[in-house]
Amino acid sequence: MSPSGSRRNSGRGLAAPNRAPSECHVGRRSSGCSHCPSGAQSEGVSVSLSQPMVSITLRFLLAIDLWLSKQLRVCACEKSAWGSLRPLVRLVELSGHVVPGLSGAVYGLLRAETAAEQELMLNVALALLMDLILVRVVKALVRRRGPVQTRSDLLSAFFLERFSFPSGHATRAALCARFLLARLVDTAPMRVLVLGWAALVSLSQLLLARSYVTDVGLGLAMGYCQYSLVERLWLTWDQLQDLLFMQLRETLTNTCGGLWMPDWKQ
């Protein structure tokens, strides 16, 4: 090979960029997970000084939100820092799911012995349904992707949702806690127990990398405000009976009205 050719080849080798294989840095330090699901949301935040001050402030707060959320993902998978506590944290998470809550409310409604108990269980069920609808609507409007999640089992793949804002567990925890404190709980130890449960359910979403800190914080605020709407729309047992009687009468009139109306006119 000629000296000029060797110089050209050496120059190409020096000019070639050093391409390192792509890596996934999302949640690896905090969760210890060894893989990154495809299509994961990029959590990098870039700030340019040429942007408006409001935009810079929002991006700075978003960066703090992402950083703090990463630090709290200590139970994201079995290899995380607190991976041994993952089954216990998931049990706490399950206690704040809508399915056990609605099932318990319906069971309590069927087993209630007095009209007051039936009225209470009925409004619990309606409050949970209202929370489910409002959270789904807000998630569909905001469409914020959740953090990287490990779906290593069928249970997680079935219960997890695509969008994380607001956290449904946080809204239900705040709603149920305020409902219980206002309607049922009247002793200090029980109040502490209810507030502790709501805090643990909300924290489980951060420990398991289900939601961001802002998802949980604003979800708690949303659930707290939802109870005011529950009080305004409180349905008494007498009102329910009147509604059911009116609906039944209209149904019978529309269905069987043609059978006796001719005889009534005669």
Image (cartoon, rainbow, N blue to C red):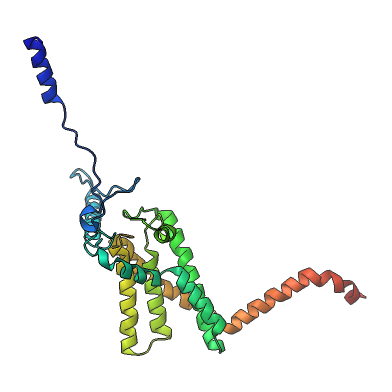
Q: Residue at x 40, y 74 (%)?
A: 175
Q: Residue at x 38, y 78 (%)?
A: 178
Image coordinates for residue 66, horizontal then vertical, percent: 25, 56
Image coordinates for residue 177, horizontal then vertical, percent: 38, 78
Name the quadrant containing residue 74.
Answer: bottom left
Task: In the displayed orientation, state which residue is furthest to the top.
Answer: 2
Q: For this view, does 137 lie left or right of residue 190?
A: right
Q: For this view, does 225 lie left or right of residue 121?
A: left
Task: In the displayed orientation, state which residue is furthest to the right.
Answer: 266
Q: Residue at x 44, y 59 (%)?
A: 158
Image vertical order of residue 138 relative to residue 201, above or below: above
Q: Residue at x 63, y 81 (%)?
A: 241
Task: Check the picture and name the quadrant holding the C terminus.
Answer: bottom right
Residue 111 at least partly seen: yes
Image vertical order of residue 78 relative to residue 201, above or below: above
Residue 202 at least partly seen: no
Image vertical order of residue 212 relative to residue 48, above or below: below
Task: Check the picture and name the quadrant holding the N terminus.
Answer: top left
Q: For this view, does 209 lie left or right of residue 49?
A: right
Image coordinates for residue 195, horizontal then vertical, percent: 32, 79
Image coordinates for residue 262, horizontal then vertical, percent: 89, 72
